[in-house]
Structures are given as structure tokens and as C-alpha cells.
Image: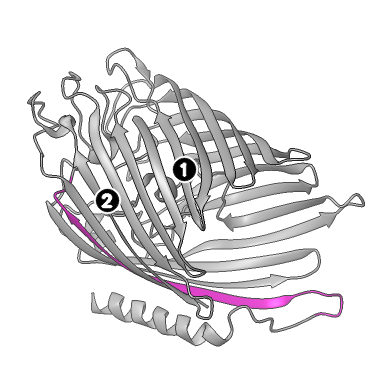
Amino acid sequence: MMVSLRLGAALMVMTALLLGAGDKTLAQSGDGARGWSFDADLRLRSEYLADSFRLLAPDHDHIQLARTVVGASFEASDWGLRAEVQDSRAWGAKSQSPIGTDDINTLEPINLKLWKRWIREEGSSLTLTAGRLTMDYGSRRLLARNNFRNTSNAFQGVLLTHDAASGTARVFYTLPLQRRPDGLERESLLNREFRLDKAGSSERFWGGSFDHRLSGEKASLGVYLFGSELRDRPSRPVADRDLTTLGSRFLWARGGADFEFEAAYQWGESLPGALSTGDALDHRAWFTHVHAGLDVGPGLNLRLGYDQATGDRDPLDGRNERFDRLYGARAFELGPSGIFGAAVRSNLRAPFLRAQWRATGSQRWLLAYRWLALDAPRDFFVTGARRDVSGESGREIGGQWELSWRWLPEQYAFSVEAGGAYLDKGAYFSGFSQAPLNPAAPDDTHYLYTQLHWRF
């Protein structure tokens, strides 16, 4: 542990030493090339949880997390490269704390990529990127470089992007990086052992998208197609899948109003769990998101919306209808993840009301309420690892409150954030059905976090 602490301290010192170099060009070429630039950031967060909703977890938990990112870029007029190392660590976890590779991944190069751009006469451009890379797409609900989460999704492959005045098209083929040590090697993970992530042939992720900018409106219409393949390997049991996801997203904004609608349909074959045996099941699932927002005062925006992602209605019908959330992020919309993370886009129904207030130029407030329910009462409450196959526990998970405050002073390269969540547990936790995988847990869940973030 002392070695890990020293290594973490050394990374923090290296980040501080880069303070003077951040965003500064070290070399300029005569043709307008930017040359070399360096950047880094350090984030420290403390989380506390009381009265967990999970089946196997300590009633009270308290962990500390650190994430350090150091990057270097070289950019010329039509090509460039990017190298970025992310170090993610956690301390203080209890034996049954729900932490894993989402929280810990030491000294990992998440970006080692080379790109080349061709500019066309009509002003459009074509960019080819190859290597290790992180990706964001659209709403980030199905493909994202994670922000609140302590580690990031990363891939190895190629990405081709075409940008024009009318819109943006992308196609990619990748092998997702498998974070190591994995969750089964818990002692190695908690000791923050270094192992380079690997891209194996057992996992593939590919796809394409086109986002069209609607003329005369601050609006866009997008369509995407993603393919995901995942297979067991001896040291890493997973829920096998071979899925295709087709979706569309519409955005519109005018004045102080905005509207968004997104829906996706998913089909293929999958196993319902990592320990499932036998033939893969026929997979048919979908998710949808809709919201409308309105500015109602100086700096104050209200948003009303609804999320739904299907669950497996009948565990014995030879089909799997639980939506697979692929490589998306959730904390930006469904509430804090970390050791909380009650909501996920799988077996979910969730209407919500959210208020965002820009109190000053540097302060942001968020208050949100979301009613959480299972789409399919006989399927898993995914994040709680609970299940009542009889369905007698019902679908009401409860009401989730979220509050956060963020201070981002413009004159300094850091931000301060504090927040929390409260789950007012519903009838699902009453223990009425006496289901062995859903025992009574009536006490409401409380979660708090504080965070410091420096960018250099």
C-alpha cells in the first residue's frame, strides 16, 4: 500500500509541475502548425453512503477516490497525435463495498492515437483516427467518455469522421479495452496493482452515425447504428451478447425553450447474466428519453421528462428483453454513480423534474426529483442486484432526490463541488413477498460527496 500511496503522490506532484505548461504551445511551425501542447488534471473525491439499497453491500460505506490525467498532443495543419494516461485509485473500501473497475484502473494509457485530416474545397473535412481512443456520441447515453465515474471507457481501433455544413457522419470499428485487474481479482484491484488493459477478440464494438443540422432552426436530427459482441473468456465470465442497436435523436431549441427525444431498439442474442448457461436467448429491447425545458427566470431552467428502458418481463419465456446500455454514461442525467448509482438505463421507468440555477457567473446549483420504478417487476433491479421472480414485490423502487452545488471561479484552474442524493425507498423494499433475493431493507438511503478538481 505504501508503494501505491507514493506512486499516487508522485502523480499529483507531476500534475502540479505541469501547471505552468498547461495550454502553452512549445513549438510553432511556419505553416501555422500548433506544435506541442501539454495538459493535466487532478480530481479528488470523497463519498459516503448510509443504508444501502444493494443486496450485498455494507450498510454504511465511505471511500476516497483520486483520478489523475496527464496528456500530450502534437498538432500540425493536417495531422496530429495524442497521448493521455489516466490513473484512477480508491482507498478505504470495505470488504463488500460496490467498487470495481469503474473506480480503479492504475496508470492506463486511454489515448494513444494518430489522426489525419483532409480538407475539401467545399469546406467539408474527412478525419481518420487510429489507435487507442475514447469516444463521445450525441447524448452520451449509449457511448461516452465517462466524467463523474472514476475510470473511462476506452477502445482500440479506427474512427472516420466527415464534417460538413449540413451535418456530421462517423463510422468506427473497435475492440473495447478490458480493464485489468478485473472485478474477480478483488484483492489485486483493491491493492491498486498495475496491469495494462488489453483489447481481446472476445469483445467488439462498431457502428456509424449521421447527425443532420436542420436549416433555419437550432435543431438537429440524428440516426445511429451500433453493434456489440461480447464473449466469455476463462478468467472473465460475462453475459455473452451479440446485439445491434438502432436509434434516433431529435434536438430543438429556441429562445429559452428546448426539447429532446431519443429512442433506440435493440435486437440479437444474449445471455441474461454472467453466470447463465445454455444457449443465448433471443434479445428484443428498447429505451426512450424525452424532455422539455424552459428558462423561467434569470439563470433558472426547469426540465420535465421521462426515461424508460425495458426489462425482462418473463424469465422463463426464452427471451431477454432487458435493455443493454452499451458504453454510455448515466451520472449526468440519472443521478450520482460511484457507490450510489441507484438508476441505470436497464429495467427502468423514471419520470423526473429538474431545476438548474446559474446563481452567479461561477456558481451552479442542481435540484432534481426522479421517481424510480422497474419496467419489469420479475426482472433484476439491476444496480441493487435484487430480484423477485414472482413479481410480488411490485415495481416501486422509490423517489430519488438529488442536490449539488458547483463553484467554478474563472480566474482559477480549479472547481469545488458538493452534493448528495436521497432514495426514499418504495414498496419494493418492504420484504412483503419474502423473496430470498429481495429481503426487507426499509431504511432510506443517504449519499454525500465532496470533490476538488484542478485543470492545468
Considering every residue shown, the one lying at the far right of the view is 121
- Left or right: residue 287 versus residue 159 is left
**x%, y% of residue 395?**
24, 26
Q: Amino acid at mark 2?
A: Phe
Considering every residue shown, the one lying at the far top of the view is 317
- Left or right: residue 413 versus residue 128 is left
**x%, y% of residue 297?**
50, 53
**x%, y% of residue 400?**
28, 43
Label 2 sits on residue: 340
Q: Is residue 39 inside the magenta stretch?
A: yes
Q: Is residue 81 above or below residue 302?
A: below
Point 53% across, 78% down: residue: 456
Element on which disc 1 rests: strand
Q: Which mark is residue 303?
A: 1
- Left or right: residue 355 versus residue 174 is left
In this orientation, does residue 363 appear?
Answer: yes
Question: Colour scheme of this structure image?
Answer: one colour
Q: Which residues are magenta?
A: 29-52
Point 56% across, 37% down: residue: 260
Q: Of residues 139 and 279, which is closer to you in this image?
A: 139
